[in-house]
């Protein structure tokens, strides 16, 4: 079973390949990613949004290579090796890591992993507006907490529901309707918050006119919803315009957010060719993947 995951296409394609090639030279900030991984895409979007200099290193996390496990004992991507020269944004130069898995530990501030932690770190470490643009979290303490609440909603409700629906097969112990219901409820609750907060008056994003980490956290799964439509009978099942009853406004807000997010430059720049995802996610749709996310979903455990 493990072959299914270790035999994945070993490189980026399409727009993501162009981006990876532009960031292939050694740099004190090393970003270990895998082209197919939505958790990686979160951090990758932040790197692009904030124009953060870095080295992109494509790996297959299912191989659990020794050098990678030394960096991240959890053996998951994204993983960010932060060189002394990298932190804070500006300094790049002498002492840059010389490439290879992990670079030089002596010159390293440390290693970070977990996509939400990596995204917040990048947003907080690279604050020079002239170089990196505005922050991806609001200034107000309450608004920041509200954003974290909805980031938690994505992690606790939407992402697990995505895998339960995509990995549904006959005789599962739960029906596809049940899985679809959970998925739709997660998306609708997110959209309802956007309506209730009135953000739509200013623009399409969760915070209206301002793109934030809340958008970043959900964007990779929004981009992958087509995989559910491709593989599962009835697909995601978002009701059609005019057939949404009392939820017309809420789903219209979802449509607006979705259209904007899939067209966001940073989301497109970190995307490989669409058919490659169809190929890679077949192992989820058949429920034969041995990935940790796949196993946790199969066993009803929380995701890694
Ligand atoms: N909670 C982690 C999840 C990361 C994750 O599951 N990454 C997958 C690739 S999409 C991985 O590295 N899988 C390796 C494995 O399952 O062995 C995060 O947010 O970064």
Image: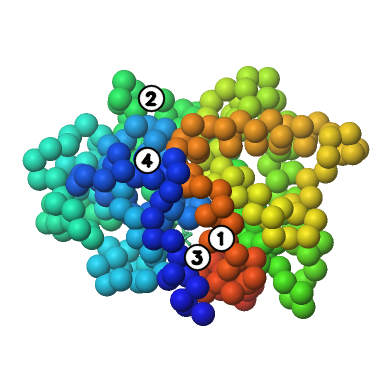
N-terminal-most mark, 4 or 3: 4
Query: Can residue 132 be seen in the rendering of this structure?
Result: yes
Q: Which residue is mark 1?
A: 279
10 Å crowding of disc 4: few (<14), some (14-19), many (20+) = some
The quadrant holding residue 205 is top right
* Element type where label 2 sits in the image: loop
Residue 141 position in % (x across, y down): 49, 33
Residue 299 position in % (x across, y down): 62, 76
Separation (CA) of disc 2 from disc 4: 22 Å
Separation (CA) of disc 3 from disc 1: 23 Å
Residue 17 against residue 206 in the figure, above or below: below
User: What residue is rendered at 31% in x and 35% in y?
Assistant: 52
Q: Which residue is mark 2?
A: 133
Q: Relative to 95, is 3 on the left or the right?
A: right
10 Å crowding of disc 1: few (<14), some (14-19), many (20+) = few
Separation (CA) of disc 1 from disc 4: 21 Å
10 Å crowding of disc 3: few (<14), some (14-19), many (20+) = few
User: What residue is rendered at 70% in x and 50% in y?
Assistant: 186
Residue 146 against residue 41 in the figure, above or below: above
Q: Which residue is mark 4?
A: 18
* Element type where label 1 sits in the image: helix
* Element type where label 4 sits in the image: helix
Separation (CA) of disc 2 from disc 3: 32 Å
Disc 3 beta carbon < 8 A from ligand 1?
yes
N-terminal-most mark, 2 or 3: 2
N-terminal-most mark, 3 or 1: 1
Closer to viewer: mark 2 or mark 4: 4
Residue 148 position in % (x across, y down): 54, 43
N-terminal-most mark, 1 or 4: 4
């Amino acid at each position: 079973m493990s072959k299914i995951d270790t035999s994945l296409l070993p490189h980026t394609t399409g727009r993501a390949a162009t981006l990876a090639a532009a960031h292939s030279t050694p740099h004190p900030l090393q970003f270990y990613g895998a082209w197919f991984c939505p958790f990686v895409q979160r951090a990758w979007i932040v790197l692009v949004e904030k124009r953060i200099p870095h080295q992109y290193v494509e790996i297959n996390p299912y191989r659990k290579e020794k050098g990678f496990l030394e960096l991240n004992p959890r053996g998951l991507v994204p993983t960010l090796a932060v060189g002394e020269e990298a932190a804070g944004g500006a300094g790049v130069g002498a002492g840059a890591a010389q490439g290879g898995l992990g670079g030089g530990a002596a010159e390293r501030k440390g290693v970070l992993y977990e996509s939400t932690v990596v995204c917040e770190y990048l947003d907080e470490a690279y604050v020079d507006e002239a170089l990196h643009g505005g922050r991806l979290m609001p200034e107000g303490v309450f608004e920041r907490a509200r954003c974290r609440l909805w980031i938690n909603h994505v992690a606790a409700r939407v992402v697990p529901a995505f895998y339960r629906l995509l990995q549904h097969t006959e005789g599962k112990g739960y029906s596809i309707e049940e899985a679809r219901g959970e998925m739709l409820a997660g998306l609708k609750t997110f959209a309802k918050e956007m309506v209730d907060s009135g953000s739509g008056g200013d623009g399409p994003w969760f915070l209206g006119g301002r793109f934030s980490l809340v958008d970043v956290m959900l964007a990779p799964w929004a981009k992958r919803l087509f995989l559910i439509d491709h593989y599962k009978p009835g697909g995601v099942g978002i009701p059609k315009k005019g057939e949404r009853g009392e939820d017309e406004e809420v789903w219209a807000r979802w449509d607006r957010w979705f259209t904007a997010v899939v067209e966001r430059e940073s989301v497109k720049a970190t995307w490989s060719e669409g058919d490659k995802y169809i190929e890679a996610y077949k192992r989820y749709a058949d429920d034969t993947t041995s990935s940790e996310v796949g196993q946790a979903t199969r066993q009803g455990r929380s995701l890694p």
